[in-house]
Amino acid sequence: MSAPRSDSFSTVDGTRLAIHRIGEGYPVVLLHGLFSSAVMNWIKWGHADRLTDAGYEAIMLDFRVHGDSESPRDPAKYPQNVLVRDALALIEHLGVEDYVLGGFSLGARTSLHAVAKGILSPQKLIVGGMGVAGLSEWNRRSAYFKRVIDEFDSIGPGDPAYYSRQFLKSQGVDRVAARLLLDSMTDLETSLLGNVTMPTLVVCGEEDEDNGSASDLAELLPDASYKEVPGNHLMSATKPEMGEAIVEWLRVTE
C-alpha cells in the first residue's frame, strides 16, 4: 500500500478539508462513503494503488466530518448540499479541468448531484454503491443513520443497526456534526439524471441493495455501463474487484 501525499485546504466557509494523493498522471478524483474516509474506501484496500499502477493519479478528499477533515458543530456550516459545495471547492483548489470523478455511496450521491445540476463537469464519472432510491428517497435512508446516532449507546448485538454503529465508532466520527451533515442532504429529482451525459460506470456489489437498484440507475443515465462485483454494500468496497472494475472501464473508455 503506497503512502499518500496528504495536505489540506480551506473550503468556502473556512472548514479545513484533507486531501490525499497517490501516483502521477491523469487525475481521478475520488469521494468516499458516509462515516468512512479516503483511507478506508480507497487506500486501505488497494484501489488507489490499482489506479496509480495503471498510470493515473488518485486524488482523494476527506469530506467534512470524516477522516482528517474538520468536524464543525456550528449548524451554519451545514447549508443544503454542503458536500456538493465542498466538491466544487476541491476541484477549484486543484485547478483541474480535465479529470475523472468517482464516488462510493455518499461520494457517488454527491457526485451525481454535482454533475446533474451542472456544478461539476468531469470527463468521466464513476458511481459506486448507489441506486435510484439512494438519490430519490433520502429521508428513509437518512432516518436509519439518524437512529444509529440518536440511539448509539443502546444499540447492541442482534440489532440490524449494530454493524453501522460499530463502524461509526471505529472511524471516530463526531456524532453531533454527523447529524447536522445528514440534515444538509436532499433528494435528487431523477429527471435531472438526463444531464449526466459523460461516460459513466455504475459499479455495485451483487448483494448490495442498500441504496436501491444500481442497474435501474444505470438505465436512467444516457451513457452508462453497469458492472456487478462481489459483496454487499460495505464489503464490496473492500474487494479487489471494485478497483479492478474501475481500472478496466477507464482503459476501455480511453
Image: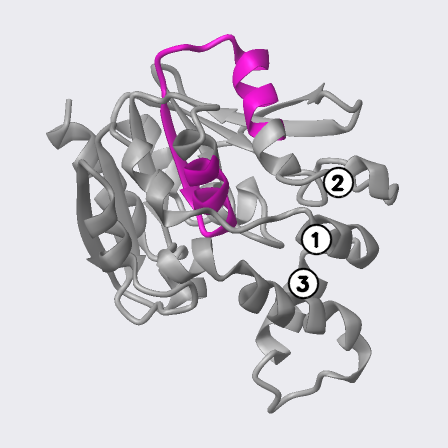
Q: Is residue 77 visible?
A: yes
Labels 3 and 1 touching (C-beta < 8 A): no
Quarter of the image containing the C terminus? top left
Quadrant of the rendered image containing residue 167: bottom right
Quadrant of the rendered image containing residue 67: top right
Question: Which amino acid is tagged 2?
Answer: Tyr
Q: Residue at x 45, y 36 (%)?
A: 111
Side of 189 relative to 86 (left or right): left
Q: Which residue is mark 1?
A: 183
Magenta span includes 101: yes
Q: Which residue is mark 2?
A: 78
Labels 2 and 1 touching (C-beta < 8 A): yes
Question: Which amino acid is tagged 1?
Answer: Asp
Pick out the residue farthest to the left: 252
Labels 3 and 2 touching (C-beta < 8 A): no
Q: Earlier in the sequence, mark 3 or mark 2?
A: 2
Regarding mark 2 in the picture, which secondary structure is present there? loop
Q: Which residue is mark 3?
A: 168
Q: Which residues are magenta?
A: 86-113
Regarding mark 3 in the picture, which secondary structure is present there? helix
In front: label 3 or label 1: 1
Q: Earlier in the sequence, mark 3 or mark 1?
A: 3
- Disc 3 and disc 1: Cα gap in Å? 17 Å
- Disc 2 and disc 1: Cα gap in Å? 8 Å
